[in-house]
Each structure stands twice: as structure tokens, then as C-alpha cells.
Image: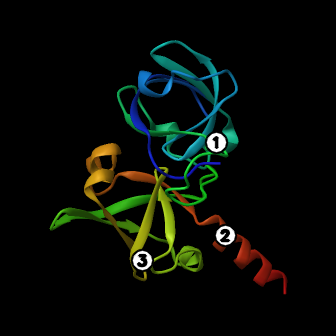
Amino acid sequence: MFTGIIEATGTIRRITGGRSLKMTIECPAILGDVKLGDSIAVDGTCLTVTHFTAETFDVDIITGTSDRTKFSAAQAGFTVNLERALMPSSRMGGHFVTGHIDKVAKVMRTFRQDNATVCHISLAPDDQPYIIDKGSIAVDGTSLTVFKLAPNYFEVQLIPETQRQTKLMQLKPGDAVHLEFDMLGKYVLKQKERV
């Protein structure tokens, strides 16, 4: 379980494989207390540490994960958002994020609005029920608020702290992003379908 509050950004140093991948990520800032088997959200995807050094950690990406994420197109040098798993004693600054990606979407437009950066992200019609105005959504693992919901996109706004702490400021039209819809909303919709 994660909060969507990004701790640091890292750099993919190596990625090998086809549909099953092995990835090495450099980010010494979060490795001080890492252990084998720890969960780290990489661009919002919950992955397990299989090896680590003082500078890097390795993760394996199985086909079920690579089929649902953008990692099959990742390359060495890519920047990724990172968050270690939530500890029971942590403050809950974002929202409940599981690290299970629902969709890969595309950035449609970015622009400045005073001190915020506004992003419009594509949304398929069948995903509309999972997003509500002023609701929460995780974009590349970052907990954000939906400011506008349109027929084919939703809008999020990046505050200055999010601009500094995440890689989201690097996004440009056409870039792929991981989406995780709000878990509580998904449960409510599932129960409604059963009634």
C-alpha cells in the first residue's frame, strides 16, 4: 500500500528481457533501509526488490505487469517516480494507492496557470465512471486531484511541490502515463454492479 506522495525520482540504468523484464534503477536516496522483498512503487507500479546495492535496486516485471504498463517501452536513462511502501505509523498525505495499474493513458496537453502546471490526460469513455470531479487519481504513482472531467480527458494540476518532487514536469503531449483509479471508487462501483 502506498500514499501517492513521491519520495524521490530515480533513473533506469538497465532494462532487459522481452515481455518479462528485469530492471535496475538508481536512486540512493531511498535505499538506506531497503531489504530484499520490499515493495517500491515505480511510476506507481508496485514492484519487489530482488537485489540492491548502495546506489541501485533491481526488480522483476512479469508478463502480467508488462502487459498492463508502459515498461515494455522503457529504456535506460528514463526517469521514474519512486515511493516506498506505507508504514502503519506514516501520515497519510495522499490517498490509498495499491500500485496496481488500471490503464496506460496519454498526456494530451500541458500548460502553466499561475504557479500550477495543468495536465490534460486522455480518458476512454468506459473509464469515465471511475473518475469523479475533485476525486483522487494516481498518475505515475503521484496522488493528484481531478480538477475537470471532460468526455475524452481529465485535468490535474501540479502544485509547486509536486513539480519539484516528481518527474511529472517532464511530461509532454504524447507521453504515456500509468493511471490507478481510486480504490474506494472501484469497490463502490463493483458492489453497485452486483446489486
- Please state which amino acid type lies under the numbered disc 1: Met
Q: Where is residue 86, by image quadrant?
A: top right
How many C-alpha atoms fall within 10 Å of the one at disc 3: few (<14), some, or many (≥20)?
some
Residue projecting furthest to the bottom: 195
Left or right: residue 92 compared with residue 172 = right
Tell me which numbered mark, 2 or 3, is placed earlier along the sequence: 3
**Residue name at image x 76 percent, y 75 percent:** 190
Task: Identify whether 80 is placed above or below 171.
Answer: above
- Badge 3 element: loop
**Residue name at image x 84 percent, y 81 percent:** 194
Q: Nearer the viewer, mark 2 or mark 3?
A: 2
Tell me which numbered mark, 2 or 1, is placed earlier along the sequence: 1
- Badge 1 element: loop
Circle 1 residue: 87
- Please state which amino acid type lies under the numbered disc 2: Leu
Q: Is residue 74 visible?
A: yes
- Please state which amino acid type lies under the numbered disc 3: Asn
Circle 3 residue: 152
| Residue 8, horizontal then vertical, whole percent | 40, 36
| Residue 81, horizontal then vertical, whole percent | 43, 41
Q: How many marks?
A: 3
Q: Nearer the viewer, mark 3 or mark 1?
A: 1
Q: Nearer the viewer, mark 2 or mark 1?
A: 1
Which of these two is toward me, 105 or 168? 168
